[in-house]
Amino acid sequence: MNRKLENGLWRHALSLMTATALSVALVLPGATMAAPATADVSKTGLAVTDTTVTVGILHSLTGTMAISETGSVEAEKLAIDQINEMGGILGRKIEVITEDGASDWPTFAEKARKLLVQDKVATVFGCWTSASRKAALPVFEKENGLLYYPTFYEGLEQSHNVIYTGQEATQQILDGLNWVAKEKGAKTFYLIGSDYIWPRTSMKIARKHIENVLGGKVVGEEYAPLGHTQFGSIINKIRLKKPDVIYAAVVGGSNVAWFKQLKAAGITGDKQTLLTISVTEDEVLGIGGENLVGFYSIMKYFMPVENENNKKFIAAFKAKYGDDSVIGDVTQAAYLGPWLWKAAVEKAGSFDVDKVVAASPGIELTTAPEGYVKVHENHHLWSKARIGQWQADGQVKIVYESDLIEPNPFPEGYQ
Amino acid sequence: MGGYTLTELGSIFVMQGFAGLSLFSVLLLMALGLAIIFGQMGVINMAHGEFMTIGAYTTVMFSVLTAKFAPGFIDYYFPFAMLVSFLIAFGIGYFVEFAMIRHLYKRPLDTLLATWGLSLIMQQIFRSAFGAREVSATLPEWLLGSFQPTESIDIPLNGIFVMGLTVFVTLGVFYFLFKSRWGLRVRATTQNRIMAGAVGINTRLVDRVSFALGCGIAGIAGAAFTTITSTGPTTGTLYIVDTFLVVVFGGAASLFGTIASAFSIAQAQSIMEFFMTGSMAKVLTLLTIIGILMLRPEGLFSIKVRK
């Protein structure tokens, strides 16, 4: 910090940032002090000029997934604004081209190609569902683009061209199951999810862990079609099996119907332990806190995480998007993307994808709202898992926090 | 039986029966409005789901405003919200018929495209006006929780409410169509438009009111569904397939058919769901429906008309 204070320009910038309450204290390497020549930082024809660098944001702004992806777009834009206010990256301001994936997987691939081939963006922040990532992945690999992907997902993937800023399945699932087994003495589990790749893969891992490691029993495994709103029959099945724990990964509108009907059927947090991997603050807006009281979620981030970074992040987010905004797990993970990219570009001294990718493993972010994260060689993040218990007002109380967990997208014995 | 006591099995049986009935009332409530528009008028209204969404958003708005300005009133706002949902959906339906549908009566396939376009426009309007995130209404206390006739039976209160509402609306529609002068005019117009016009029935007004009424009922259905699930800009698309399924399976021109079809689909779905996974149950239900429709293309019930 001393070196920075000696520099009048930085002092000015610093006071400006504090005044606007938008500052995120960053460890700034000396490389940013003077802008290096464009020919040095971009040798592969990316959209880099002497003063700007262009990046892409690729999320669903319309269609059914817009509900979830809006928060990620907001977080990515906030991070980019903050980076620009600090002087940008390698002396260049970030310019954003936003494309709409329209909740349609082929559109994601098409727009990814447009961003990489036509716009020559230096990196893309985007994709949300596994389906959209799987659709766009071949494009990123063929055109050698770079993607920062924010969502917690099922794992079993690792690409040269993707940095995964959310949790992969083992980081979320194993700790949660260990916790209910230890704290609640749970022996029997009922698994329920929406019927697509992420819940099915997650449940597969959960079942292996329950049966092989915890010595428990899975008494039911159930998948409801996406958009399902009538859970009466499933709830009756659960009632018949009397599991110690309901383990849930229901998504979207179904999620709301599921929790409302659980409550209406008299299955509530004081009588039944329920742990879900698909409810963040974003979902609670729709579900309503009163339907979730006493149930548990496992994520890596909840709004009440206590540290200075998070306070600043929430204040900045609310200042930009309104006091009512909530920040879910994925929104926070999306916010990490631009910062991780900045750190990697500065370490590499170049925007070129291969150099940025090579520089990425080992990048640490001490300013992450979730605390501290570090990029693993497998392109996933070391991060913590947290379990929160829902309160009637839709807030969460954090009841458990793990140590940093090493990401392991290809867990042995779980496939 | 598997270590369960007789009481437990009995309770599950009762609750499972209720789950079927509850799904039946949801399907019927969705389909009633469409049965009038598609069944009586032959208009394929792809925007039907969006009229439900109008009702749902109206209820959510009502709940937000009540919580803000008259918190003491929160236990009572729901019936008013439903009434206003009906009126708003009715009004918009009336306007849509005037501005769009009436120009397309002679081109049924174009109505399909036009109303589909309308549904996309409406979804985007919802998204711009209310945001992309799903929202929920704050429900009054009397709609939450369950009714417990015995120790081990829990009957969801919102299910009972939707069921009661469905009975009420169905009776209302029957009365309107088969007992009132208006209903007489509607049926006359359906059966023979030219002749109905010749005896002095204002067939254009009949069309407009029928369409608006169908939309209004969709509004009520949307309001009622806020007790079950959340509301987002694309909520309507969740319902539209099931709705058409019920109406087509039942036989387009017959209200009894709609009821019978809603009942059989609901029972089949919920019973199969109990014994197999949800996705398999849905697949089997759809296969059965396709099979029956191949044998009886006109649906379960059909009215004999001179062709």
Image (cartoon, helix red, strand yellow):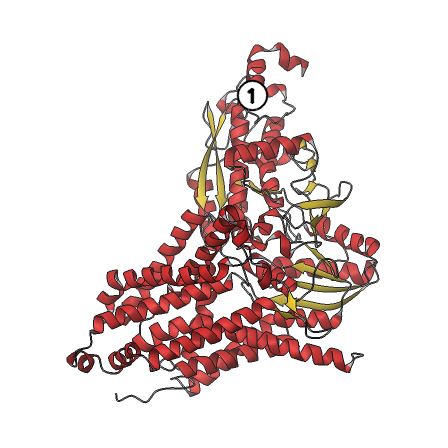
Give the answer, above or below, for where A291 lies relative to A363.
below
Q: Residue A57 or B212: which is nearer the viewer? A: B212
User: Looking at the picture, which amino acid does disc 1 mark?
Assistant: Ala
Near mark 1 (Cα within 10 A), the count class, few <14, some 14-19 or many ≥20, is few
Circle 1 chain: A
Q: Position of residue A113 (x, y in %)?
A: 46, 45
In the image, residue B237 lies at what x, y percent? 45, 62
- Coordinates of residue A317 in the picture (x, y in percent): 56, 35
- Left or right: residue B298 versus residue A248 is left
- Residue A123 appears in view: no
Task: Locate the C terminus of chain A by quadrant.
Answer: bottom right
* SS type, badge 1: helix
Q: Is residue B65 visible in this depiction of the protein? A: yes
- Residue A413: image location, x then y, percent: 77, 58
- The residue positioned 52% from the left and 59% from the top of the image is B76
Residue displayed at 65% across by 45% down? A395
Figure quadrant of residue B6 = bottom right
Q: Quadrant of residue B50?
A: bottom left
Pick the front one: B244 or B51: B51
Judge from the rendering whether residue B182 lies leftward or rightward of residue A221; answer left or right.
left
Quadrant housing residue A99: top left
- In the depicted structure, whether residue A343 falls above or below residue B244: above
The residue to which callout 1 is attached is: A19
